[in-house]
Structures are given as C-alpha cells and as structure tokens.
C-alpha cells in the first residue's frame, strides 16, 4: 500500500522494492489511495506490479489497471479461455472499460 487512506502515511515503496528484489521476490504496490494524489512512476519506484483503481478517480466501480513490468511472469488463478494473454478465463464486459476512457467531471455523479 503506497498510501494509507486513514492515516495518510506514505510507505517507502522504492526501498521496499529494492529489498524485495535483493531477496528474489516480486514487489506489488497497491496504489489505490495514492494514484492521482502523489507522483507515481513505476520506473522510479522499481516495482514489478502496481494496481490502481478507477473508482478513486470517479470511474465506475470495477475498473482497475495492473502494471506488469516487462519480463514478469504471471500465472492465472482461474484457467479457461485465452483472454488477456491466457490470464483471464472470460472476456471483459465491453461497456465498463469504455466508460473509463472518457474524462469525467464530479458533476456527472452528483444529482
């Protein structure tokens, strides 16, 4: 977790990623609370994986992005179809990703 949503504490992600790599482990950063609030550059942070979520930036719930560093091998949790390079067993819902593609104003979600 890059930033704690309750205390506001920022974690030393660069140091944690460096330590993880030194011990042969991958480093995943949950940047849900940090994205759009503090600078996040995966190259500077040195993480292997980073997750951001759309609903923290006024996108519909269920929209998220996963950064995967080149060369990082992933294994599917559920086997099935070959979508998403064999990592997803079913196609995504077409309207959901397209909704997050257009910029939203806060007024879009307030009646």
Image (cartoon, grey):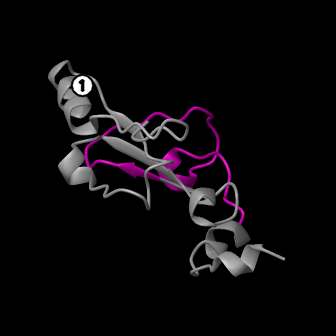
Q: Is residue 83 left or right of residue 4?
A: right
Q: Position of residue 39 (x, y in %)?
A: 31, 58
Rendered position, 86 above or below 64: above
Q: Is residue 69 left or right of residue 63?
A: left
Q: Position of residue 53 (x, y in %)?
A: 55, 54
Rendered position, 54 above or below 31: below
| Residue furthest right as drawn | 111
Q: Is residue 108 left or right of residue 83?
A: right
Rendered position, 56 above or below 15: below
Packing grade of label 1 (10 A; few <14, some 14-19, many >=20) is: some
Q: Position of residue 43 (x, y in %)?
A: 20, 52
Q: Position of residue 92 (x, y in %)?
A: 67, 59
Q: Quarter holding the C terminus? A: bottom right
| Residue furthest top as drawn | 23
Q: Which residue is mark 1?
A: 20
Q: Quarter holding the N terminus? A: top left
Looking at the image, which residue is at 59% across and 57% down? 56
- 37 or 89: nearer the viewer: 37
Quarter of the rendering containing residue 57 = bottom right
Quarter of the rendering containing residue 14 = top left
**Membership of 75 in magenta stretch:** yes
Main SS of residues in magenta: loop
Residue stretch rendered in magenta on the structure: 66-93
Q: Give SS at disc 1.
A: helix
**Membership of 73 in magenta stretch:** yes
Quarter of the rendering containing residue 8 = top left
């Amino acid at each position: 977790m890059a930033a704690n949503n309750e205390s506001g504490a920022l974690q030393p992600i660069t140091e944690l990623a460096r330590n993880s790599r030194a011990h042969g482990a991958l480093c995943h950063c949950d940047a849900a609370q940090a994205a759009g609030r503090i600078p996040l550059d995966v190259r500077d942070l040195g993480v292997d994986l980073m997750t951001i979520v759309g609903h923290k930036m006024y996108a519909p719930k269920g929209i998220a992005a996963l950064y995967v560093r080149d060369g990082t091998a992933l294994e599917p949790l559920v086997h099935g179809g070959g979508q998403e390079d064999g990592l997803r067993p079913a196609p995504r819902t077409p309207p959901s990703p397209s909704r997050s593609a257009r910029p939203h104003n806060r007024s879009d979600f307030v009646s």
